[in-house]
Amino acid sequence: MDLEKFTDPNNKKTDLNDPYREPAWPNDILYIFLVVILDTIACNVGLVVLEPLMIGEPVDPFATPLEILPEWHFFPVFQVFRAVPNKLLGVLIEATLPFLENVNKFQNPFRRPVATIIFFIGTAVTLWLDIGATLLIDKSLTLGVF
């Protein structure tokens, strides 16, 4: 490759020995990374000093609530495990879900209508279970409507 063909916007030939044309690596990149990392640490330390977290009340291991809820993104799986009486059946249901996606070789959703319908039904069921996981067990599957 001929480096003399590369020119700057003013149509001047690029001088590769120009001292003002220093490489980005390692000169700039390492210094910028160091500055960004130190600034991030300084911001975090500053936030901790200015707004410390308050320590809550002491934990009582003998006062466990009846309905313990997981994090919000585990609600649908939690609801399946809570609603299905046989826990092995719930685990098998969850284990078969990834295999439903690979039924068809096409990537276009319009060429895979079965997978698209399964996706929309699965999304609706997931939202239904997500909402139901926050309710008591007797109202969780019907959302208290029926």
Image: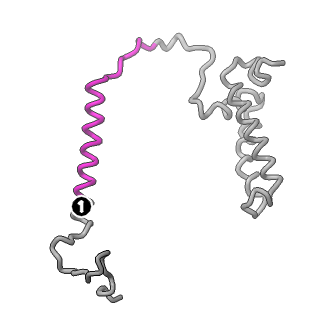
Q: Residue at x 35, y 88 (%)?
A: 1
Q: Tag 1: residue type?
A: Asp
Q: Quadrant of residue 15 in the image?
A: bottom left
Q: Position of residue 40 (x, y in %)?
A: 29, 42
Residue that carries the numbered disc 1 in the rendered image: 28
Q: Nearer the viewer, residue 52 or 69?
A: 52
Q: Nearer the viewer, residue 13 or 95?
A: 13
Q: Tell me: 78 left or right of 71.
A: right
Q: Position of residue 76 (x, y in %)?
A: 68, 33
Q: Local crowd at mark 1 within 10 Å, few (<14), some, or many (≥20)? A: few
Query: What colouring does the structure picture have?
Result: one colour
Residue 33 inside the magenta-drawn segment: yes
Q: SS at mark 1?
A: helix
Q: Is residue 27 above or below residue 72?
A: below
Q: Main secondary structure of the magenta part?
A: helix
Q: Residue at x 80, y 18 (%)?
A: 145
Q: Residue at x 27, y 60 (%)?
A: 29
Q: Is residue 139 above or below residue 35?
A: above
Q: Quadrant of residue 49 in the image?
A: top left
Quadrant (top left/top right/bottom left/bottom right) for the C terminus: top right
Q: Which portion, as a residue range, is magenta?
A: 30-59
Q: Tell me: 120 left or right of 75.
A: right
Q: Position of residue 66 (x, y in %)?
A: 62, 14
